Amino acid sequence: MDFSFTDDQLQFRDAVRTLLDDRCPPAAVRSAWTNETGRIEGLWARLADMGVLGLMAPEERGGLGMGEVDLVLLLEEAGRAAVPDPLLEHTAVAIPTLSDAGVCADVVDAAVSGAVTVTVGLADAGPYVLGAEQADHLLLERHASLHLVDAAAATITPVSSVDDSRRLGRVEFALDDAQLVSDDPRARSLAFDRGALGAAAQCVGVAQQLLDVTVAYVAERHQFGRPVGANQAVKHHLANVALAIEFARPMVYEAAWCIATGAEHRSREVSVAKAMASDAVDLACRRALQCHGAIGYTIEYDLQLWLKRGWALAAAWGDSRRHRRRVAAALQLA
């Protein structure tokens, strides 16, 4: 049995990587820290044109009708490029949740085309909503039910983040201003699993980028007449990061398959993947900072873009400790 990705899936990933290299370089990510929107001009429209935004929407709604296995590689690339837009929330959670519920078809159509942005706030995902001020619609949880709210009808209070390109907000809304999407606990559980999977995929992408730039740095940086990377301790640090990534990545892919196929132990596998990916990116952040030395602390150096994104994603949609407790509960160990 062949568990590898298809040529089409890999080519789609490569096309998205090329786009992000062009439209989402470090300088553009930096601009999202201080501009009014917290986003990169033109990137959202290009992602829509490529079909990324509507990848999981049904074909009759203008989407590609694909699933989590097709999307997971693209989210990994979004992590590698530190994309500031709420791509995970919009594409991996909001659009498929609304489509599955068979509601708000006009919002789904607009979301697929990139005309509007939909972000997500679930109780289990944390108290704040990513991109709340920049979004047009909010998929929010209240009383264990999912509701769609126009952003203009909600009260949004900005909240500072360790990563200023991830604009967070505290959201309050009245049920009278919201449309019920689903009161089925299975829909809420699936939405959370999709979000946790997406965060795990982005963690792997950030971790890989940190490893790549650190390997390049220690090969170029010389001390006492030899590359820093020639030191055995540095090699061990980076080898440990590489191992953590190589163990986490297949678990993320396996979790994507579990969601796409409706596997019985879907939530358990998602939590295993998120726990391993959170640990991997945390280790990658720590070792990258250590191997770069003092320059890694400076805001002028691009490394801090991925450090802050990595630590933010490690905690987003549940940190490793929370997901390990979820695994323990699934195995009836807690």
Image (cartoon, rainbow, N blue to C red):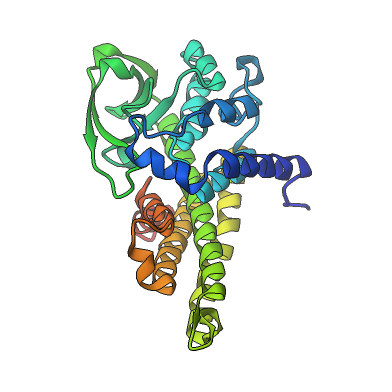
Across and down, in percent, residue 89 comes to 44, 34
Residue at horizontal 23%, vertical 38%? 159
Q: Nearer the viewer, residue 22 or 209?
A: 22
Count of numbered badges drawn on the protein: 0
Across and down, in percent, residue 320 comes to 38, 58
Across and down, in percent, residue 142 comes to 28, 27
Across and down, in percent, residue 143 comes to 27, 27
Using the rendered image of the protein, determine whether residue 263 is visible from the camera's viewpoint: no
Residue at horizontal 54%, vertical 79%? 229
Q: Based on the displayed image, in which of its 4 quarters is residue 55 positioned?
A: top right
Is residue 180 positioned above or below 22 on the image?
above
Q: Nearer the viewer, residue 117 or 280?
A: 117
In the image, farthest residue toward the bottom: 224
Is residue 6 positioned above or below 136 on the image?
below
Is residue 66 positioned above or below 274 on the image?
above
Using the rendered image of the protein, determine whether residue 16 is visible from the camera's viewpoint: yes
In the image, farthest residue toward the front: 225
Q: Based on the displayed image, in which of its 4 quarters is residue 164 positioned?
A: top left
Quarter placement of the C terminus: bottom left
In the image, is 259 to the left or to the right of 199? Answer: right
Is residue 16 positioned above or below 220 on the image?
above
Q: Nearer the viewer, residue 103 or 81?
A: 81
Residue at horizontal 56%, vertical 41%? 259
Q: Based on the displayed image, in which of its 4 quarters is residue 127 positioned?
A: top left
Residue at horizontal 50%, vertical 17%? 115
